[in-house]
């Protein structure tokens, strides 16, 4: 079943200003566990802590964006969103760590360019530094330096995703065969070819990432403290 976050992907991406990254969400639930923790982290991934405040900030932004669009957020929907958001943040950290191990890097120029191209930080089509400072402090409740550090790690994980995308690229010769194998009608092939190719590419990349992340999750310690934090402990 498609997760709540993936169903609302466009809204959520806009809500947190990450316009360059498409989220990949996988079933890591069986690979992380809860335990005692004396810090203010919502999870620990291979020794790296994910701050609870950062998690709560992103959750609030997401809920606000959905409600602003007129979506009625039920308790069940919010509960699912909480789990999906935590899973997303764990996956982001896993990917960033593995990208570092593979020697991938994100330059200062890449970070700056991405931020400057974000519409939420622009006024009249141009990057506005004062607006950027205000938005980061108001929406993310962190200093610009901290925001840029978080941004860099997201971009690092995105580079690894892009490599995975290239490795699973669909060849033109495969499209017709896969289309027919999936039960597609030959008479509709030309009209549906491009859309089918995009869907096939996305599915292959998702499958590869799922497999890769499940392998990582068996060798990287992942600890969740969401239940503790939500209960005030």
Image: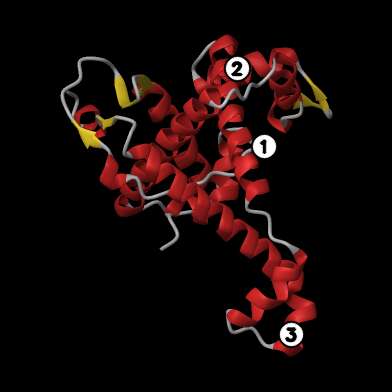
Q: Nearer the viewer, mark 3 or mark 1?
A: 3
Q: Is residue 97 left or right of 15 when viewed as pictured? A: left
Q: Is residue 214 visible?
A: yes
Q: CA distance from mark 2 to mark 3?
A: 47 Å
Q: Residues within 10 Å of mark 2 (few under 14, many from 20)?
A: some
Q: Element at badge 2?
A: helix
Residue occupying the point 24% across, 32% down: 230
Look at discs 2 and 3 and give the one toward the viewer: 3
Question: Nearest the camera: 119 or 102?
Answer: 102
| Residue holding disc 3 | 188
Residue 20 numbered tag = 1
Mark 2 / mark 3, whichever is N-terminal: 2
- Residue 139 seen in the figure: no
Which residue is the site of mark 2?
Answer: 148
Q: Is residue 197 left or right of residue 69?
A: right
143 vs 170, left or right, is: left
Quarter of the image that includes the N terminus: bottom left
Q: Earlier in the sequence, mark 2 or mark 1?
A: 1
User: In front here: 173 or 63?
Assistant: 173
Q: Residue at x 20, y 33 (%)?
A: 34
């Amino acid at each position: 079943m498609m997760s709540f976050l993936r169903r609302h992907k466009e809204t959520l991406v806009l809500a947190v200003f990450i316009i360059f990254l498409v989220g990949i969400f996988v079933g890591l639930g069986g690979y992380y566990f809860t335990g005692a923790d004396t810090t203010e982290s919502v999870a620990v991934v291979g020794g790296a802590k994910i701050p609870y405040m950062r998690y709560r900030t992103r959750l609030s932004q997401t809920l606000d964006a959905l409600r602003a669009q007129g979506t009625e957020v039920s308790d069940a929907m919010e509960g699912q969103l909480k789990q999906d958001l935590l899973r997303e943040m764990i996956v982001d950290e896993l990917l960033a760590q593995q990208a570092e191990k593979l020697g991938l890097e994100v330059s200062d120029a890449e970070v700056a360019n991405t931020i400057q191209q974000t519409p939420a930080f622009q006024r009249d089509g141009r990057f506005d530094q004062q607006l950027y400072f205000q938005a980061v402090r108001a929406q993310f409740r962190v200093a610009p330096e901290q925001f840029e550090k978080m941004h860099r790690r997201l971009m690092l994980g995105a580079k690894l995703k892009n490599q995975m995308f290239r490795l699973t690229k669909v060849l033109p010769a495969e499209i017709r065969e896969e289309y027919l194998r999936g039960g597609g009608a030959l008479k509709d092939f030309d009209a549906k070819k491009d859309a089918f190719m995009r869907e096939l590419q996305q599915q292959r990349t998702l499958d590869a990432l799922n497999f890769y992340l499940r392998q990582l999750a068996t060798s990287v310690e992942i600890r969740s403290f969401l239940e503790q934090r939500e209960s005030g402990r």
